[in-house]
Amino acid sequence: MHRLLVNIVLCLSMCITFAQSKYTHEVYFNTDEYVVPTTEENRLLLFISKLQDIEIESIAIYGFCDDVGADSYNMVLSQQRANAIKTIFSNNEISESLIHNVDGKGEILLKIVNEKNVLKIRGLNRKVEIIVSEKIPEPEPVTPEIASTKEENVPDKIKGDLKVGDKIIFKDILFRTGYSTVVPKSKKTLEDIAKALVERDDIYFTIQGHVCCTKYTRDAVDKKTKQRNLSVARAKYVYDYFAKKGVNKKRMRYLGMRRKFPLGGDPKFDRRVEIVITYVGNNANK
């Protein structure tokens, strides 16, 4: 009996540990409209910004209408509302491959909402529901062989043998979704790279900024400035940081690459910066 109880507790513990976390948000619309109101878009962008620190498994988007209007009309309008939300996600560096459901569900009946005021009920029913499921991390077994084959880091690559045309990707420099600033855990690595570049003063290089998840190789919108030049802003952020840390500006230039060169893996790694060596010589600072 005791062993059975222990097994049940262990099972429950595992279920809790590996339970999938879900994040929800609702966007409300005006009557007969599928254009997202400005205040609601701002709320949605704030919600999207909070997703930057999680690994997303999937996103579901469901559109709804109130009980006014024909069923066929409400089905079309609810789908348009869902599509409008998907567009905002896509324009803010959320990969469409993560969006598994974009469905218009038609009307919600009045009795579903616990509210007596009919106008308030209808206002609450003109909405889109968003459900974001977090990816459950899979434990990776570490063997002595794996542990001993650590990949060379960026500062070591900078100090090593370089030639014109070499490209060094800053894999550990991750950017906030929709912004040109790096996530906090990347700052120490960026500082180490800057120190290596100060010491290695015989190279010139171009800093290339990239974005993820936009369509047709377009650039993404910088949420801070509202301009569609996020890849440029990311490159300039690194350029300014290096200059502040003592790298001679004459050795550097920056360039936005938009979404011309996705890496094909996790979208977060497309929100990246890399450098391309343009000159290798002696005493480049002099």
Image (cartoon, rainbow, N blue to C red):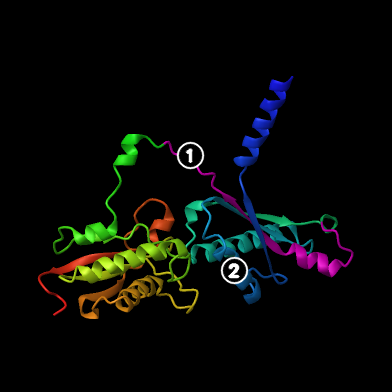
Q: Which residue: 61% across, 41% down? A: 17
Which x, y percent locates residue 223?
A: 50, 74
The residue positioned farthest toward the left in the image shown? 282
- Viewer-closest of 204 and 188: 188
Q: Is residue 196 left or right of residue 124?
A: left
Residue receiving disc 1: 139
Which x, y percent locates residue 12?
A: 67, 34
Span shown in magenta: 113-141
Q: Residues within 10 Å of mark 1 (few under 14, many from 20)?
A: few
- Amino acid type, mark 2: Leu
Q: Is residue 210 above or below residue 11?
A: below
Q: Which residue: 43% across, 69% down? A: 220
- Amino acid type, mark 1: Pro
The C terminus lies in which quarter of the figure?
Answer: bottom left
- Viewer-closest of 282 and 84: 282
Q: Residues within 10 Å of mark 2 (few under 14, many from 20)?
A: few
Which x, y percent locates residue 78?
A: 67, 60
Image disc number at residue 46: 2
Q: Is residue 17 magenta?
A: no
- Viewer-closest of 131 and 276: 276
Q: Is residue 165 above or below residue 263?
A: below
Q: Which residue: 33% across, 78% down? A: 244
Label 2 secondary element: helix
Q: Is residue 138 magenta?
A: yes
Label 1 secondary element: loop
Which x, y percent locates residue 138?
A: 49, 40
